[in-house]
Image (cartoon, grey):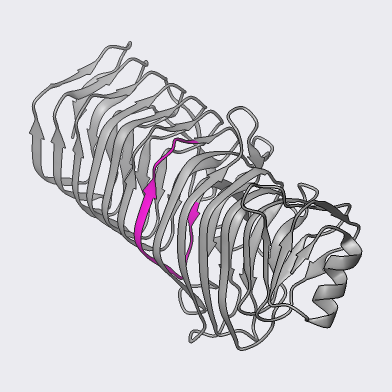
Amino acid sequence: MKVNTLASLLEVINARSSKEIEITASIYSPNSIVLPEGITLKGTDNGLGVLSFGNSDGIGMTKDNTIENITIQAPQDKRAIYIAGTDKDLGELRLSNLTVTGQVQLLTRATTTLTHIFAVNIDIVSADSRNQVEIPQKMGVVVYQGAFTIYNFNPNPESNIIATVKNISIGRKNAPVLGSGIFVSGYSPTGGKVNVNEISSEAIYSNGMLPFGLPDRITGGFFILEGVNAEKIDNYGEVVTYGVNDMVLDNWGDVMHWTAHKNLTSYGPSGIGFVNFGYVKKFSSLESIETFGLGARGFNQYDGTIDDAFFNEIITNGDGSVGIQISKPVGKIEVKNKIVTKGNAGDSLVLGKIVHIPADGVSIVKGGHLKELILQNGIETLGDNVTSLDIQGVIDSFTNDGTVTALGKDSVAISK
């Protein structure tokens, strides 16, 4: 049924007189609207449908709902789309071809044990997700939700969200969303799970807006958290973060195949390019990882493991910004172009604490064990009192077709 006023929209919803509602105009609602079970809400094929919310959350989904081909505008610190259903099985929740202001929060709670989520072609122009109270914690830090959030907030280990997510865009260049960008989380390693068939993103721009010197809170452009099993992740657009403790890519879950097709860039202090605290079978960064902030490392492995990682290029510009740092056993790491660090020693966020570290090129700390390191073009450090290749742990096999150089004052090329 076609509607073009708020009154007609609410009448159809309340009467449940149609399973498919088509919005043919711009409609303003002062209050949130909850879709009953089985309802599809859509705009016209030529993009006329707009649904705006004054000072409230937007559309609540309950069970077997579809929202498609529509623009949804809520205040950026509200939820434009959220889950209002509490049934044990929420069926299939489908989102497609949406332009959104406000958070898309797909969060299930203790009463729900199964949800299927399909989200395709979602463009979140602006959102502020920092005020959401459900935040996971690990190793002394908590993580803010994202503009696009999937979260199984059910401690029951039998509960599950099964998700397929494609072509999600977050924020705008130099106009990022606030909080994290994409956020996917289970309840815990022993609680509710999220099983991801695939996630793909276009460009992501986010800023956690955290104050400098606060070590126990972090955000990320693309964050996979505990309780998540992801088969395939593709970042087809660049991922850029602007804030303090604002990771570009961060993993606490289990990922089989993760490919970053475009640049990964951070501008803020301790904005690490790629952090892995979980398990990754295969990771590939096909363009550049570059960080500009104080203590913003290129890649670090402080927990969990990674079997096979390929990096095209890693460049860090700030003091205390290590190129690659390893403190756990990992498999193979290969870097095609040069690893370059330009800074001296500086403060960096390490395991929930601010510590002073040199901007080494590659650092294998005690407890770190790297099976194979392949450098096609070597390492170059420009800062003072740094080490280009610092081996305090173990490297089983090392191949270097370039040079390892330390150009700064009192710096060392290789230290064992």
Is residue 399 shown left or right of residue 21?
left
| Observer-nearest of 340 and 4 | 4
Magenta stretch: dominant SS? strand
Q: Please name the residue shown 61% across and 89% down the image.
A: 88
> Where is 93 relative to 166, above or below?
below
Residue 79 on image: x %, y %: 74, 58
The N terminus sits in image quarter:
bottom right
Residue 387 on image: x %, y %: 28, 25
Q: Please name the residue shown 52% across and 70% down the image.
A: 117
> Where is 200 relative to 289, above or below?
below
| Observer-nearest of 49 and 92 | 49
| Observer-nearest of 358 and 260 | 260
Is residue 119 shown left or right of residue 43?
left
The C terminus sits in image quarter:
top left
The answer to whether residue 39 is magenta is no
Res. 141 visible in picture: no
Residue 328 on image: x %, y %: 29, 54
| Range shown magenta | 223-239
Is residue 232 shown left or right of residue 127?
left
> Where is 85 relative to 280, above or below?
below
Is residue 405 shown left or right of residue 44?
left
